[in-house]
Amino acid sequence: MDQLQTAAARYAKNGEISCPDAHRLAAELGMTPGQLGKAITESTEFRFYRCQLGVFGYGPKPEGLSKIILPAKHVPPAIRAEIESVTVDGKLPCAEVWAIADRNAYPRLGLANIVEAMGLRVIPCQLGCF
């Protein structure tokens, strides 16, 4: 087993590594999340799950249960403006959603719900999953 496989195995449960654990592992190995995602995908059998924005990994996809995002009922105007400032063609990067959430002391999943209510898509994923 190489270093990546051994390190990833510490975090894996049933062959899957959660998004939060993948970010921790990337930091431990001195990699960006994107570098780690590519390395895991290309050289191991592990898969990622439990996206911190609720986009995937929470249940069976064929049954429509993979996502946990719900459109927010209220979109604060200041947060809407921040989101719109980084949106291109209806899409904004995962890293930008995290940054906006952090700047506003807002839960990441809560911000993803706002993005959903605005009819936007989060892409690309920091780990390269979408």
Image (cartoon, rainbow, N blue to C red):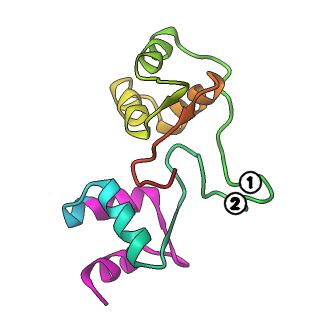
Asked whether the beta carbons under mark 2 and mark 1 sit within 8 Å of each other, the answer is yes
Q: Which residue is rendered at x = 39% and y = 70% of the image?
A: 40
Secondary structure beneath label 1: loop
Q: Residue 79 in the image: state x and y as whole percent.
A: 46, 17
Q: Please report the bounds of the magenta region as a residue range.
A: 1-26
Q: Residue 105 in the image: state x and y as whole percent.
A: 39, 28
Q: Residue 121 in the image: state x and y as whole percent.
A: 57, 34
Residue named by callout 2: 59
Q: Which residue is rendered at x = 45% and y = 12% of the image?
A: 81
Numbered tag placed on residue 65 in the rendering: 1
| Front in this rendered view, residue 103 or 63 | 63
Q: Quadrant of residue 70?
A: top right
| Predominant SS of the magenta segment | helix
* Residue kind at label 2, given as amino acid type: Gly
Q: Is residue 11 magenta?
A: yes
Instruction: Pick out the residue farthest to the bottom.
Output: 1
Neighbour class for label 2 at 10 Å: few (<14), some, many (≥20)?
some
